[in-house]
Amino acid sequence: MTSQTLPIELYYWPTPNGWKISIMLEELGVPYTVKYINIGKGEQFEPSFLKIAPNNRMPAIIDPEGPTADGKWGGAPISIFESGAILQYLGRKFGKLYPSDERGRAEVDQWLFWQVGGLGPMAGQAHHFRQYAPEKIAYGIDRYTNEVNRLYGVMNKRLADSEFLAGDYSIADIASLGWVKPYKNQGQELEDFPHLKRWFDTLLARPAVSRGLAVGEDHRRNLADDKEAQKVLFGQRARA
């Protein structure tokens, strides 16, 4: 396993996407420091942050001991944005929670991208229309609540035959957990999905998961009544 001497810098806010990386780093047991990016105050638009995260979204990391040209470690620093890419990078570097064989890796990748392209965006839309939209639009609420319900059903069916999403515990599970955690805000009940509930409870019982979810917990607050933060977060358009 690759050792890490210098701490990885984690650019973070305690959200479902941020939790992916704090949990992963805790599972790996490698040194890291947290650089909080207050997304409600617009810190994601600071030029210094945009240099490492051009999509003005956290999480992002800087690894001061990046890869070398010959595939070794301990080279020049590297910055990475997008949570799925960060999880894959850390899994490759440290040889944990991401298989080294192509068949196993393909199994993990398909569930990782299922979360990145499906569960996360659809749950996020459910949150928006159910909690933040200034007008309660029934079509939007029903559309995304039902789609999250469908996706929970996909997970439940998979987890009826497998302990974890990709067989063994992996970055696919870490990626999905944070988007199931606020299930009530998505209009769901875990009792309707017993295999998903078993998986959810199993992950929450892991000490590293608990530590990862606790990172920045004191920074979290309900944005439903914070109109200024909503102005920053919603309705963004292209910037010069």
Image (cartoon, rainbow, N blue to C red):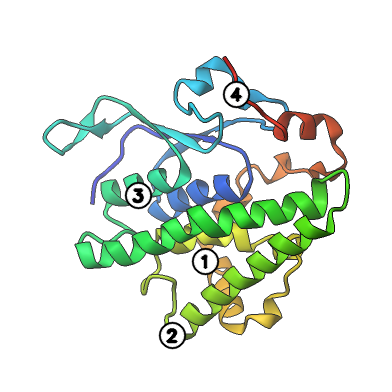
Q: Residues within 10 Å of mark 1 (few under 14, many from 20)?
A: few
x and y percent of residue 27 in the render?
A: 43, 56
Give the mark, 2 or 1, whose residue is nearer the N terminus. Answer: 2
Q: Residues within 10 Å of mark 3 (few under 14, many from 20)?
A: some
74, above or below 112, in the image:
above
Residue 161 circle label: 2
- From the image, tell me which residue sits under label 1: 206
Q: Report, in whole angstroms, how far the alpha carbon at label 2 lies from the one at label 1.
A: 21 Å
Give the mark, 1 or 3, whose residue is nearer the N terminus. Answer: 3
Q: The residue under label 1 is which amino acid type?
A: Arg
Q: Looking at the image, which is closer to me, 7 or 156?
A: 156
The residue lying at 78 percent from left, 52 percent from top is: 129
Secondary structure state at the residue bearing disc 1: loop
40, above or below 163, in the image:
above
x and y percent of residue 77 in the render?
A: 31, 26
Kindly indicate the quadrant of the structure image that contains residue 146: bottom right
User: Mark 4 or 1, which is nearer the eye?
Assistant: 4
Secondary structure state at the residue bearing disc 3: helix
Q: Report, in whole angstroms, how far the alpha carbon at label 4 lies from the one at label 3.
A: 28 Å
x and y percent of residue 33 in the render?
A: 49, 34
Q: The residue under label 4 is which amino acid type?
A: Ala
Q: Are marks 2 and 1 in contact (CB under 8 Å)?
A: no
Q: Report, in whole angstroms, how far the alpha carbon at label 3 lies from the one at label 2.
A: 25 Å
x and y percent of residue 128 in the render?
A: 74, 49
Q: Report, in whole angstroms, how far the alpha carbon at label 2 lies from the one at label 4.
A: 44 Å
Q: Residues within 10 Å of mark 4 (few under 14, many from 20)?
A: few
Secondary structure state at the residue bearing disc 2: helix
The residue lying at 71 percent from left, 39 percent from top is: 219
Residue 2 circle label: none
- From the image, tell me which residue sits under label 3: 88
- From the image, tell me which residue sits under label 4: 238
User: Mark 1 or 3, which is nearer the eye?
Assistant: 3
